[in-house]
Image: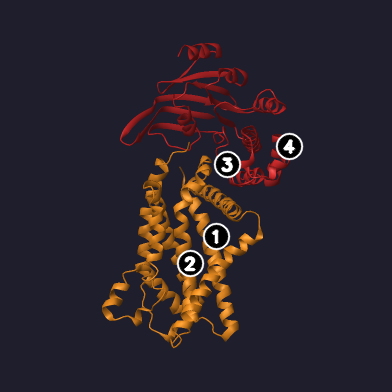
Amino acid sequence: MSLQGEAALILRGARMQSRVIGALIIREMHSRFGRHYMGYVWLYFEPLLLGICIGLIHAWRDRPAAFGAFEFHAVGYILFFVFRGILNRATMAINMNKPLLYHRSVTLPDVFYARHIIEFLSCTGVMLAMLFGLFAANGSLPESPLKMALAMIMMALFSQGLAFLASAVTAAVEGSERVVHAVTYLLLPVSGLFFLVEWLPDWLAQMALWVPTVHLFELLRDGQFGSRFRAEYDLGYIWGWIMITHLIGLAALRITRARIGLE
Amino acid sequence: MGLEMVNVHKTYVTRGLRKDILRGASAFFARGERVGILGRNGSGKSTLVRLLGGIEAPTKGLIKRNMTISWPIGMAAGFQHTLSGADNARFIARIYGRPIQETVDFVEDFAELGEYMRMPMMTYSSGMRSRLALAVSLAIDFDCYLVDEALAVGDTRFGRAFAERIERSGLILVSHSPALVRKLCTRAAVLDQGQITFYDDIDEALATYHAL
């Protein structure tokens, strides 16, 4: 095939895939919330409310902290919600969308992309609302919104890779979806949501930096507070995790697709 | 132009048990042709349909698709039962890149669902589901319709409209119902022992099928 022909073919495929993902997003919104506007409002308020609650609990407990404890935890929790929202929903994704696989243009990864776009956009909206609220309340502005945005994007991608893997595992091993939910809670204390690497003793900091999400929280806070602390993160390390989880995850989905029965 | 299967094998392994469903099946379906494939229960009809529809890949062999072919239309597979018929029609119009309102209007007119069009599909009777599935697929306008199992069309206004509409397109009907094949198809084959055998005329195919 000529180079031109090949390019046209890729373009046609890309157009079809974006059509499918667009349709899946609309369908997902309808089946998740029905046709009621309250549903859409909830999509937005769930992470916002949880973020505010976690922020308030910590603001009350650690009043003398150097940073605003509320700002630190409320904003951090929204980043955690990207992870939690994507990974927790992954376990049901295949079963809920099985009937759609009868249309051969709908692929398993498309189903995930659609959900992750919804999750990412709603968390980004919540993040903007939170930052605006903080600005209105005490005039604080993030030092580098770009770094915060990068943290959100990379968190979504990392969670996406894990979601591929988690759903492949839950499709293969019955009952394992409960483990996934438990794991997202167990990861909460080590995720980096509640600490800065700077606060840890040296030996613990070394260990914490093995955890990919710790880097992401450092990146987020570098954008949020910047010069007020020494951030420690390695973007290459996170990209490595993103790449490996995608590679193994997509391969696992391919195997899953061949194994799941469509009756 | 058409759809060709060349020496297609399909093997499933469940719990270490190997099942060869298709063993070197070959067939050619020309564009615009209406073909019936008869098979007994357990002969691998649904497997054949999934392979023809491109939902599963063959274990070995080749399937060349040179015309647009519908998803398998039978008991409303490919639909989301928590959503309404209209929402499902819109979704399918979107993924196949068809005008949305036009599709919904056509389905509304053809499937005769009345106000059920705006109700969740789980409230539908099986006849309503199958009318919706057929109407949506006809709205997309494929070269060839892939139909699985007995159609609940019957000799109703809808059934006659469907039979008349299908005359203008191609059809691959995989079924255990000789009467339906005789009514809708111009050529017939029998699926048995993992292979597809075509016959010169429908009567011969039906006789072979009855003798199985």
Q: Earlier in the sequence, mark 3 or mark 4?
A: 3
Q: Quadrant of residue B141?
A: top right
| Amino acid tagged 3 | Phe
Q: Which residue is mark 1?
A: A118
Dot 2: what SS?
helix
Image quadrant occupied by the N terminus of chain A: top left
Residue type (three-letter) at the residue carrying disc 1: Ile
According to the image, label 2 marks what residue?
Answer: A81
Q: Secondary structure at mark 1?
A: helix
**How far apart are the two marked residues, 4 and 2, measured between alpha carbons?**
45 Å
Q: Amino acid at mark 2?
A: Phe
Q: How many other residues sit within 10 Å of disc 1, few (<14), some (14-19) or many (≥20)? A: some
Q: Residues within 10 Å of mark 3 (few under 14, many from 20)?
A: many
Image check: B16 left or right of A151?
Answer: left
Mark seen at residue B79: 3
Q: Nearer the viewer, mark 4 or mark 2?
A: 2
What chain letter is assigned to the residue under label 4? Answer: B
Looking at the picture, how far across and down is residue A187, in whole percent? 38, 66
The Cα–Cα distance between marks 3 and 4, rounded to whole angstroms, is 19 Å
